[in-house]
Structure formats: structure tokens, C-alpha cells
Image (cartoon, grey):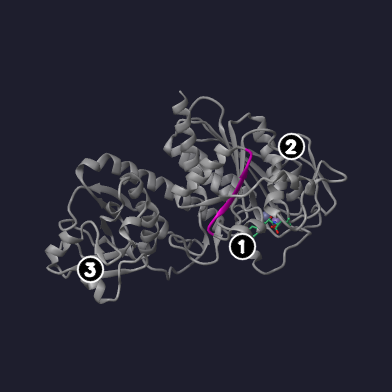
């Protein structure tokens, strides 16, 4: 990974292979542009104008300095209207030029200075944009025909007085981006390799590396523990299920509890999906990957709060021993569910994990899952959905998502729909009618958390993308890893405020 550093040098004097400078819509020169104009003896924004560019969010222009400045080339980067520049503007603009910037060994920039106030957040967003925008998943490619990646050092320029805050922003950006890339790698890994045991092994190695406690439940232990949902969904696959528990000790008091859906492949089971797009169902463990990524970042950031995670993982396949429609499963804690559609499997494994977490008496429970096509229909690909029993938890998640550039939207946990999951043979059934599917899925999960403050995040739309975005290539987005980290950090702040 490239090394980031803060320097109080001026843009005109910094030695670098590439100098990335911001311009606002107009075009209007951003911080550092005037100094560089001076040494170049030209007006950079007029070059932009002569190319027909106005400094809007997608405009950029590469200008070689031909030996007239210590920097080899200048990359002008449009940020749009000056009064609307936010950390997320910086994250997205930086993400779009990241692949190009990564062709240079030493990069310097004034881009974070373009944000009014909140320098650490602006710097964090720049670091995230650059690292995440340059992310590639090429582990399965032989000859690397992609663009070369030479990036070694990145200097973020600013006033000496800001050095301490800037270094904090750099470190947070590195940790947030690295955790996001970690989750992306897991989600992008094909299901032939990313089995429940692979997730468990990866979690164990990660826990050892960042010093988290980790316990993996194998098949026999799951049987003894009464985890009928995780086992039932896994029955049709040759890859046995697992349950991964992680613990971070950072404070005193009841922990925040996290869970994430870890279906390593969702064929639908006997209620099989049609062929079109089924390849994306290798990403049905994105909730699990997000929680693993978030726990990794939490271990490195060391917030003053306790956090536990329980991540259920099964592969949903239609083998001869698979569960059938009409089967009844007994979950952890004793509640039963009637399986009317084996493709509504995520809630079946999460039920067990939520019941286990509830036993640990946490202060709040959050689960994350690629749970329903219905949520994707409702909110599209840019917004996750959240439903919960506690307004403060939901609001904190929405706020964390907003500042991470991973926004969500609240949907109702509408109690009158509860009758849709009433079963004639078991405590609940695993599907409602065709309408309001995101809500009935959440109501099913609610049955297993008791009366704890709880929120469920449906990431079916946001976890992966069929097209490249501002700072991700086609495939896994890493959403909502940074939301979860921010949420946990907020809980630590609340704990301090109470003391
Ligand atoms: N993993 C899918 C949901 C999904 C769909 C995620 C598209 C990402 C993109 C989930 O297990 C599922 O199959 N849900 C069903 C539930 C239905 C059978 C009640 C759905 O949404 O159709
Ligand atoms: Zn699924
Ligand atoms: Mn399914």
C-alpha cells in the first residue's frame, strides 16, 4: 500500500511525479493553483477552459510541466460548485482519478483544502477515494493487462498548524479504506473458493493479525447448540456451515453486537433461482464480509466500547439432502420456522445468530444482509434500507452512512404485516405474500432478537454493482463497511458522554 504523509510545503515547490490540484466550477482555481500558475507562467484554468471544461465534477485535465515546476505533471480535478464541496465530493472526485494517479510513483495534492472546514474528514475522504478508486480484483488473472500500479508515496499538502489533525485523517482514511478493500476481496472471491470454512479461516487469521478474540462453531457444535437454521440451509451443500464469533474489548459495559448474512452462494436451493444473474449470488455473503471488515477496522482504531459479532455462514444449494418447502426448522433458543421457500434462506441463518447474540445481553444489535430483492426494488442501488425497533440506533446508522458517503433510508417495521408470517404448523413461516417483502423479512428477524434495541440493514442493492462506480470497479462495493465502523465509533462517543 502507498505511504501517505502530511507536508507543509507549497504546491509550487513540492517534488512529485504528479500534482493533483482542485478546480471549482466556473472554472475557478482551487487551493494551490495560483502558486503553480506563477512558476509555470501560465493560467491553468484557462487551459481547462480551452479544452471546453468548466471544473464540473467529472472534468479533469492532465498538464505536463516540461521541467518548469518541481512536479512532473499537474492533474486538474473538477469538484463542481465551490459552495457544495463536501468530503464525499472529494472522495468521489479522487476515486475517479485514482487509477490514473496510481500510474505515478510520487503524488502530491492540495485537494482536501478545497473543503470548507473539517480538514481531517476531508483528508480521510481523499485517502479513501484514492485507495478505493485504485482497488482492483486481479487475483485470478494471469498476465496483468490492467494499468500499471506504481503509487508509492502520497503527500497531502497543508498548513503546518494542521499537521496533527491531518495525520489523524490520513490514518483513519487508510484504516477505513483497507477494511473496505478487505470486504471487497471476500465478496469478489468466487464461491468455489469462498466457502463457509474459507470465511471462518479468513476470520481466524484476521483476528490473530489485529488481535481480536475469535471462535468458530463447526458442524457438530452447531448441532449440539441447536442452530437448526444455519444447519438446515447448509444441508444441500457439500461445504459444511460455520458460525464465526468475534469479540473486541475496548471499554466497559454491554457490547454492541453485529451480525452479517454469510450465504457463500445462493442458488435458491430447491426453490431454485433462474439462471439469469445467478453468478452474482457469490456476493450473498456481503453482510458477513462487511462485519468482518468493520471488526478489522475497529480492532485497529481501538474505540472505547465493547463489540461482539456472530456471523452465520452456509451455502444454499439444492443437493439431495437439501431442505424442502414444507420443512420445519428449530432455531437456536427453540423457536421454529416453516420453510415455504428455500430461497428465503438468509433470514433462516440470521435467526440463529440473532438468538445467540441476544443471549449475550448486548446494548444494541445490528444485522447486515443482502436479504431481499424487494429492498432493491424499493430503494435502488445507491441506498441501503434500514428497519429497527430503536429510533436512536436507526438514526445513528443513517448519520454514519451519510458521513461515510454510503447513505441509507429507513423503511417501516410495520407490525400489521406480522400476520403474513404466521404459520399453521410452526411459530413463524419464512415468507409473506408478494408485497412488502423487505418488511416481512425484517419482521421475521425481529422474532429472534427479543426486546433488545435492534436494527436490520438490507444491502441487496448496494453490496455489489454491475457497473463501475466513482470509487469501485464492477463487482463488490464494500458498502456498508465504513457505515458500520462509523456507527461503532459513535457508540463509543455516546459511552464517553454518559460518563
Ligand atoms: N440473496 C437473495 C436476495 C438478493 C436478491 C440479494 C438480489 C441481492 C440481489 C435472497 O436470499 C432471496 O433470494 N430473497 C428472495 C426472498 C423471497 C423468496 C421471499 C427475494 O428477494 O426474491
Ligand atoms: Zn440469499
Ligand atoms: Mn435466497
Outermost residue toward the top in this view: 499
Residue of label 1: 280
Q: Is residue 295 left or right of residue 377?
A: left
> Residue 19 occupies which quadrant of the picture?
bottom left
> Residue 48 occupies which quadrant of the picture?
bottom left
Q: Where is residue 489 drawn, in percent x and y?
A: 46, 37
Residue of label 3: 45
The residues colored magenta run 382-389
> Residue 280 occupies which quadrant of the picture?
bottom right
Tell which circle, 3 or 2, labels the residue nearer the N-terminal end.
3
Q: Nearer the viewer, mark 3 or mark 2?
A: 3
Main SS class of the magenta portion in the image: strand
Q: Where is residue 439 drawn, in percent x and y?
A: 68, 50
Residue of label 2: 332
Identify the residue at horizontal 47%, vertical 47% (top origin): 482
Q: Is label 1's Cβ within 8 Å of ligand 1?
A: yes
Identify the residue at horizontal 64%, vertical 67% (top origin): 277
Tell which circle, 3 or 1, labels the residue nearer the N-terminal end.
3
Q: Is residue 208 left or right of residue 78?
A: right
Q: Is residue 413 left or right of residue 254?
A: right
Magenta segment: does it hold 388?
A: yes
Q: Where is residue 338 drawn, in percent x and y?
A: 82, 47
Q: Is label 2's Cβ within 8 Å of ligand 2?
A: no
Q: Is label 3's Cβ within 8 Å of ligand 1?
A: no
Mark 1 neighbour class, 10 Å CA radius: few under 14, some 14 to 19, many 20 or more: some
Quadrant occupied by the C terminus: top left
Q: Quadrant of ligand 1?
A: bottom right
Identify the residue at horizontal 70%, vertical 68% (top origin): 275
Q: Nearer the viewer, mark 3 or mark 1?
A: 3
Identify the residue at horizontal 47%, vertical 49% (top origin): 402
Amino acid at each position: 500500500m502507498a505511504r501517505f504523509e502530511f507536508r507543509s510545503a507549497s504546491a509550487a515547490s513540492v517534488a512529485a511525479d504528479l500534482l493533483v490540484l482542485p478546480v471549482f466550477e466556473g472554472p475557478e482555481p482551487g487551493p494551490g493553483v495560483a502558486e503553480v500558475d506563477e512558476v509555470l507562467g501560465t493560467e491553468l484554468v484557462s487551459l481547462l477552459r480551452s479544452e471546453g471544461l468548466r471544473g464540473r465534477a467529472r472534468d479533469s485535465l492532465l498538464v505536463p510541466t516540461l521541467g518548469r515546476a518541481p512536479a512532473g505533471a499537474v492533474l486538474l480535478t473538477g469538484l463542481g460548485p465551490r459552495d457544495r464541496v463536501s468530503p464525499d465530493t472529494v472522495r468521489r472526485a479522487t476515486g475517479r482519478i485514482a487509477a490514473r494517479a496510481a500510474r505515478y510513483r510520487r503524488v502530491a495534492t492540495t485537494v482536501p483544502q478545497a473543503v470548507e472546514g473539517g480538514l481531517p474528514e476531508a483528508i480521510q475522504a481523499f485517502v479513501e477515494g484514492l485507495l478505493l478508486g485504485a482497488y482492483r480484483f486481479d487475483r485470478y488473472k494471469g498476465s496483468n493487462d490492467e494499468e500499471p500500479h506504481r503509487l508509492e508515496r502520497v503527500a497531502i499538502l497543508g498548513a503546518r498548524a494542521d499537521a496533527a489533525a491531518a495525520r489523524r485523517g490520513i490514518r483513519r482514511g487508510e484504516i477505513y479504506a483497507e477494511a473496505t478493500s478487505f470486504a471487497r476481496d471476500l465478496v469478489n472471491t468466487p464461491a468455489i473458493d469462498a466457502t463457509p470454512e474459507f470465511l471462518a479461516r479468513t476470520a481466524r487469521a484476521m483476528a490473530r493479525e489485529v488481535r481480536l478474540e475469535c471462535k468458530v462453531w463447526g458442524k457438530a457444535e452447531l448441532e449440539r447448540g441447536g442452530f437448526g437454521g444455519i444447519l438446515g440451509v447448509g444441508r444441500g451443500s457439500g461445504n459444511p456451515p460455520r458460525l464465526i464469533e468475534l469479540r473486541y474489548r475496548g471499554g466497559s459495559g454491554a457490547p454492541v453486537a453485529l451480525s452479517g448474512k454469510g450465504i457463500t452462494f445462493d442458488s435458491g436451493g430447491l426453490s431454485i433461482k433462474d439462471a439469469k444473474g445467478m453468478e452474482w449470488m457469490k456476493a450473498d455473503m456481503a453482510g458477513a464480509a462487511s462485519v468482518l471488515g468493520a471488526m478489522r477496522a475497529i480492532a485497529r482504531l481501538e474505540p472505547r466500547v465493547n463489540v461482539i459479532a456472530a456471523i452465520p455462514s452456509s451455502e444454499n444449494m439444492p443437493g439431495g439432502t437439501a431442505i424442502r418447502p414444507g420443512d420445519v426448522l428449530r432455531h437456536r433458543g427453540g423457536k421454529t420456522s416453516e420453510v415455504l421457500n428455500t430461497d428465503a434462506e438468509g433470514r433462516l441463518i440470521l435467526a440463529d445468530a440473532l438468538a445467540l447474540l441476544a443471549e449475550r445481553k448486548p446494548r444494541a444489535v445490528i444485522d447486515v444482509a443482502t436479504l431481499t430483492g424487494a429492498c432493491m426494488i424499493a430503494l435502488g442501488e445507491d441506498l441501503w434500507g434500514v428497519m429497527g425497533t430503536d429510533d436512536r440506533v436507526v438514526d445513528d446508522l443513517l448519520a454514519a452512512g451519510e458521513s461515510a458517503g454510503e447513505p441509507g433510508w429507513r423503511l417501516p417495521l410495520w407490525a400489521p404485516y406480522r400476520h403474513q408470517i404466521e404459520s399453521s404448523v410452526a411459530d413463524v413461516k419464512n415468507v409473506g405474500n408478494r408485497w412488502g417483502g423487505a418488511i416481512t423479512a425484517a419482521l421475521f428477524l425481529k422474532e429472534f432478537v427479543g426486546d433488545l434495541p435492534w436494527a436490520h440493514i438490507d444491502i441487496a442493492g448496494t453490496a455489489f454493482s454491475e457497473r463501475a462506480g466513482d470509487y469501485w470497479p464492477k463487482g463488490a462495493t464494500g458498502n456498508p463497511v465504513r457505515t458500520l465502523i462509523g456507527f461503532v465509533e459513535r457508540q463509543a462517543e455516546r459511552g464517553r458522554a454518559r460518563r
